[in-house]
Image (spheres, helix red, strand yellow):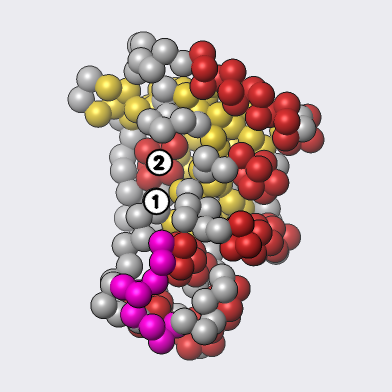
Amino acid sequence: MSGIEPAVRVEELSKRFGARWALDGINLVLREGESISIFGPNGAGKTTLLRILAALLRPTSGTVTLFGEDSHRGDWPRTRLGFLSHRSFLYPHLTGFENLAFFGRLYNLSNLESRIRNRAEQVGLGDRMQDPVQTFSRGMEQRLAIARALLHDPDLLFLDEPFAGIDPVGANQLSCLFSRLREEGRSILLATHHLAEGYALGDHLLILNSGRLAFSVDKNQTTLEQFRARFREVVQSSNGHTPNR
């Protein structure tokens, strides 16, 4: 993972739903082995951005490249990408193990049982993998969805609200896991409402508001309290309108 091209390059990205611009002229660069944390109020465009980056949604205009290539191209190697949606998309009547096994077979993964055990332990579900997902709490479902996103050892991770439904102990466990992944050279882009966790994980911090990039800073240039104050300012200054063109 030592390519010249960044892991993610976004240029003048916009997305319109009918008359509403969900994203308006977004630019960002995520280099290999780095992480970006994206913050913003509900409706800011975070989920739309991640869905476009993961090639689940096409932009209205602008370009997205992952490792220098168009990820919307049909033959782009999807195994390089791990995506966590804000919905788990798990099968409730299957066990945790069966859910991950189903996903692993889709990717034709080798050593599948060992991979499942390893990821389950990393997310704190080692003793619950034989239980049906319908018996899981919201936080446990989230942990299993994270294990699924990591099962195929992707180079790049897009995480939409990874701490949703997670208690403080679990959030700390996941933060440690994501930090280890960064140390291994993986690139992470996450969207979150959790300022402290997102601040800790991000090399670069972005605030989206009404579909536009309202603020961007390197973490080494701001403290958590300074960033928290700036976030409040951005949210309070919002008039709740969609972007003007």
Secondary element at image label 2: helix
Residue 86 circle label: 1
Magenta stretch: dominant SS?
Answer: loop
| Label 2 close to label 1 by CB (< 8 Å) | yes
Residue at the spot 52% in from the left edge and 76% down from the top edge: 125
Q: Residues within 10 Å of mark 1 (few under 14, many from 20)?
A: some
Tell me the quadrant of the picture where the N terminus can be found. Answer: bottom right
Position of residue 2 measured from the top left corner of the image (x, y, whole percent): 68, 56
Q: Disc 2 marks which amino acid?
A: Thr
Precedes in sequence: disc 2 or disc 1? 2
Where 167 falls versus 198 (above or below)?
A: below
Identify the image quadrant of the C terminus.
Answer: top left
Q: In the figure, 110 relative to 17: above or below?
A: below
Q: Residue 47, labelled with which disc?
A: 2
Q: Would you say residue 130 sits in the magenta stretch?
A: yes
Residue 151 picture location, percent across and down: 49, 72
Question: How far is the residue under mark 2 from the one under mark 1?
Answer: 8 Å
Residue 9 in the image, given as x and y percentages of width and height: 53, 38
Residue 133 sits inside the magenta stretch: yes
- The three-letter amino acid code for the residue at tag 1 is His
Q: Residue at x 59, y 63 (%)?
A: 170
Judge by depth and name the residue closer to the eye, 9 or 223: 223
Depicted 71 relative to depicted 148: above or below: above
The magenta region covers 129-138
